[in-house]
Image: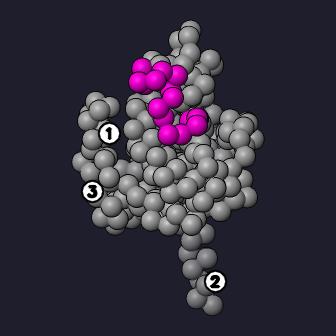
Amino acid sequence: MAEAARLAWDGLLDFLYPPRCLVCEEHARPALCNSCTACFTPVPTPACPVCGRPVEGSSPCRLCAGMPTGGGGDWAFASARAAAIYEGPLRHAIHRFKYGRMILLGEPLGAFLANRLVVDGLLGEAVDAVVPVPIHPVRQRERGFNQTELLAAPVAAMLSVPLLPRALRRVRRTPPQVGLPPEARRANLQDAIAAPEPKLLAGCRVLLVDDVFTTGTTTDTCARSLKEAGAACVYVATLAAGG
Ligand SMILES: [Zn+2]
Ligand SMILES: [Zn+2]
């Protein structure tokens, strides 16, 4: 009876205050509306074959070409792909999700990433497990959730492989990476990420999921830990590229 009363109350609230898209606040749709996702901009082609970021004319991109051995040879990951460019409604959605703690955006944003990877064929590689980039437990308590784990769950489900949210762990709290040059970012993350359960990863082809690919330092540090723990190879998938 209490359940019936709660459902009736929820129905009345939905009637009086129709749920709105959390990004545009216009369309009366769950969490994230189709008008918003239709505005997400795919990475234009040609894209860098290594990191998947937009390039003008020649490839690989300046970032990958500038790695010490050139051509991305020093990345620990085999390739990185992003579902869309970090701009417009997607940028807005990620901000609301991460900093506005709008947990309800996790599922539709993760589903968008999963669709781009699997249905649109952006991934193009077979993987055995999906690992989200970890955040420090203190930050996770403050935010209430790890945003990358929520993004990774629909990806693992669509690929029918296990989601391994504890394969990586932040063992040291690091200052925010925003605004730091790549070398400072790398130093900032030194020894901050560990793979505490190598038996989960032995021989595994891992898909590492993050929210935004900027300089690639975070994903590269995570990929290095995964490989040191025995992963056969690491591919990276992010919701957005740039920023
Ligand atoms: Zn919307
Ligand atoms: Zn690149």
Between 200 and 154, the one lying in front of the other is 200
Q: Which residues are magenta?
A: 66-81
Q: Would residue 191 be found to the left or right of residue 148 on screen?
A: left
Question: What residue would you read off at disc 1?
Answer: 186
Question: What residue would you read off at disc 3?
Answer: 173
Quadrant containing the C terminus is top left
Between 85 and 101, the one lying in front of the other is 85
Q: Secondary structure at mark 1?
A: helix
Judge depth for marks 2 and 3 and give the one in front.
3
Q: Is mark 2 within 8 Å of ligand 1?
A: no
Q: Position of residue 42 (x, y in %)?
A: 60, 28
Task: Kindly indicate the quadrant of the structure image that contains residue 161.
Answer: bottom right
Q: Residue at x 32, y 54 (%)?
A: 192
Magenta segment, prevailing SS (helix, strand or loop):
loop
Q: Residue at x 68, y 39 (%)?
A: 123
Question: What residue would you read off at disc 2?
Answer: 4
Kind of residue sitting beneath label 3: Arg
86 relative to 221, above or below: above
Q: Residue at x 48, y 21 (%)?
A: 70
Q: Is residue 138 magenta?
A: no
Q: Secondary structure at mark 3?
A: loop
In space, the residues marked 2 and 3 are separated at their CA atoms by 46 Å
Kind of residue sitting beneath label 1: Arg
234 relative to 89, above or below: below
Q: Is mark 3 within 8 Å of ligand 2?
A: no
The mark tally for this picture is 3
Q: Is mark 1 within 8 Å of ligand 2?
A: no
Q: Would residue 229 be found to the left or right of residue 153 on screen?
A: left
Judge depth for marks 1 and 3 and give the one in front.
1
Mark 1 and mark 3 in contact? Answer it, CB < 8 Å.
no
Q: Earlier in the sequence, mark 2 or mark 3?
A: 2
